[in-house]
Amino acid sequence: MIPRYTRPDMAAIFEADNRFKIWLEIETLAAEKMGEMGTVPKSVAIALREKGKFDIARIDEIEREVKHDVIAFLTSVAEFVGEDSRYVHQGMTSSDVIDTAFSVQLTQAADILLKDLDDVLAALKKRALEHKGTLTIGRSHGIHAEPTTFGFKLAGHYAAFKRAKERLVNARKEIAVCSISGAVGTFATVSPEIQKYVGAKLGLAAEDVSTQVIPRDRHAMFFATLGVIASSIENLAVEIRHLQRTEVREAEEFFSPGQKGSSAMPHKRNPILTENLTGLARVVRAAVTPALENVALWHERDISHSSVERIMAPDACIALDFA
């Protein structure tokens, strides 16, 4: 997402540094449990805790050669950890790390969005109560119908965002899963206890039945929920835009001192924020169809979903956070 519509806390979730920190934590937690079970020496987890680091520039350099991001990451970590690195990632597959980390990132994003929704709900409740007696005309088909109040209009939007919050709470729960089940998801090379341990430490549930990836219907539901929230934002934005028209002027956006409406017509007070929100809602909804199409992966896995998620997940979350 371009900086214009990016807020730093949400952007940080999808930066390489945060992603690799989560990867390192997953590998460290897995090594802790493996050490406890006697699968690998206990010194492996200790080495990862004490010396485990990564160098992003070095990872990029290695990946240009090996064409594999997890191998590049593990190679960089090994250069810091030393001899014990030979046991890191034992029995695991790349998707165990990538998908579990993606779950962490999406739950982090959901937590920010839930706080955003709380802020919206508080503002709508305040204004709805403030204007519960402010008369305005109700419209159907865009035509004057019967009187209502501006507060009642806002109460309808408040109810919509309460539903949005409930949906996002459920979507967060659905995506908050850990999958560490090895190649093709059979646990043939890694104990289910590793998945349970790592998941518990990261605040994730164990995936009931994975293949080699977390099933993408979970992700589809998450991004569909973001799309519905974006549509609720657009619904409110369009209402304000209509009410701000010159011939109506029943409501308008805040217009700050020194703000300009037009380079040619200085008298104009344009609803630019709500117009931007309308546009950003389209961006968020644009993630829904690719997320649905990601559900149908080949057999136990392919990576047709990967390139899609690298683009649309940050963009959808960042755009909705801004909105």
Image (cartoon, rainbow, N blue to C red):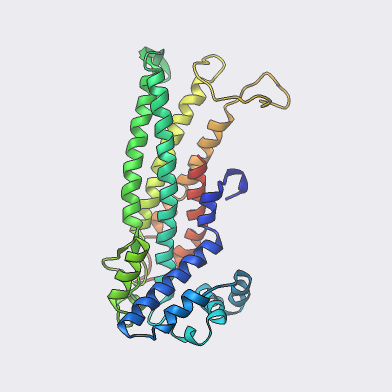
Image coordinates of residue 19 in percent, x first then y, are 50, 64
Vertical position of residue 200 compared to residue 239: above or below: below
Residue 215 at least partly seen: no
Asked if residue 143 lies left or right of residue 171, the reply is right
Asked if residue 4 lies left or right of residue 96, the reply is right
- State the residue in front, 218 or 108: 108
Name which residue lies at 36% across and 60% down: 216
Figure label count? 0
Image coordinates of residue 29 in percent, x first then y, are 39, 72
Image coordinates of residue 213 in percent, x first then y, are 37, 68
Name which residue lies at 34% across and 36% down: 162
The extreme right residue here reads: 264
Image coordinates of residue 255 in percent, x first then y, are 60, 24
Name which residue lies at 32% across and 38% down: 163
Vertical position of residue 143 compared to residue 98: above or below: above
- State the residue in front, 3 or 215: 3
- State the residue in front, 81 or 96: 81
- State the residue in front, 142 or 232: 232
Residue 85 at least partly seen: yes
Vertical position of residue 189 compared to residue 100: above or below: below
Asked if residue 167 lies left or right of residue 4, the reply is left
Q: Quadrant of residue 27?
A: bottom left
The extreme left residue here reads: 208
Name which residue lies at 54% across and 73% down: 53
